Image (cartoon, helix red, strand yellow):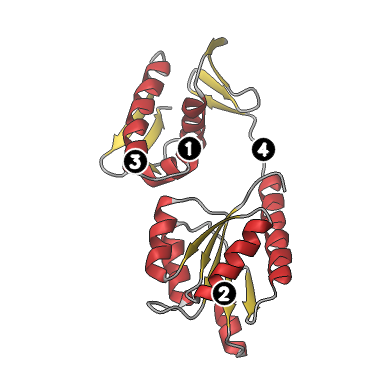
Amino acid sequence: MDKMYKLLLVEDDNSLGYLLSEYLGMKDFAVTWAKDAAEAIVKTKTNVFDLAILDVMLPDMDGFELSQKIKGVNPELPFIFLTARSLKIDVLKGFSMGAVDYLKKPIDEEELVVRINALLSRLVQDQEEEEHVSRYEIGDYVLNMDNFDLSYKGQPIKLTGKEFDLLALLAKNKNQLCTHKEILTTVWDKNDYFNKKSLNVFVSHLRKHLGKDPKLSIVNVSRRGFMLRIEE
């Protein structure tokens, strides 16, 4: 794997949690281990994960309910259930909740890794099959996604990496709200106070870069996020 995928493991059993986190770490995954649902919810709010592995039987909330809480925070995060339950109704319930896989305890670590790799490979393939957008026309500006540059009527404008990533996200969702959380987790990989302060600075920079076209504005939607508005 070229990329080190980030996994959220939610398991209240200390022995199993330690074993799985260590084993997955040896297999080049970056594992964050939460021992209950409350801790897991906090971690999903402050980190970006590629996959969540949820124990069904947790002390403060069952894994089914937790999966819905996590989907409220990050609806795109795929998850796998781990459970000692073997009833068919529980398996069906897991899949009905949106799980991409369901493993019964005792867990075979090698099988878990195979399942994770297969799921992540499929997700990556699905993303790559999405239509590739090579450029965004933003009023009189063009944002070139292949060359990572912005131009105004053919004249190049130098952007920093973060400025480019932020403008690309806003352009992709033009005339639609991008929440603070969506921006921070996409551009900075972390939703926290310090990055939120930085976001305001970067928005100010982009407003100056886009200032030559009066049809464009980056609107601050109070306490919610930003929107790239393009007047037709």
For label 4, count other residues whose C-alpha is less than 10 Å away and answer few (under 14), some (14-19) or many (20+): few
Q: Is residue 47 left or right of residue 89?
A: left
C-alpha distance separating marks 1 and 3 = 14 Å
Percent x, y of residue 224:
31, 44
User: Mark 1 or mark 2: which is in front?
Assistant: 2
Q: Which mark is residue 225?
A: 3
Percent x, y of residue 14:
50, 74
C-alpha distance separating marks 2 and 4 = 41 Å
Q: Element at badge 3?
A: strand
Percent x, y of residue 211:
38, 16
Mark 1 = which residue?
187
C-alpha distance separating marks 1 and 4 = 19 Å
Q: Which mark is residue 86?
A: none
Q: Element at badge 1?
A: helix
Contact flag, marks 1 and 3 (Cβ < 8 Å): no
Q: Element at badge 4?
A: loop
Q: Amino acid at mark 2?
A: Leu
Q: Residue at x 26, y 43 (%)?
A: 223
* Vertical placement of residue 152 versus 206, above or below: above
Q: Amino acid at mark 4?
A: His
Mark 4 = which residue?
132
Mark 2 = which residue?
16
Q: Residue at x 66, y 53 (%)?
A: 28
Earlier residue among tags 1 and 4: 4
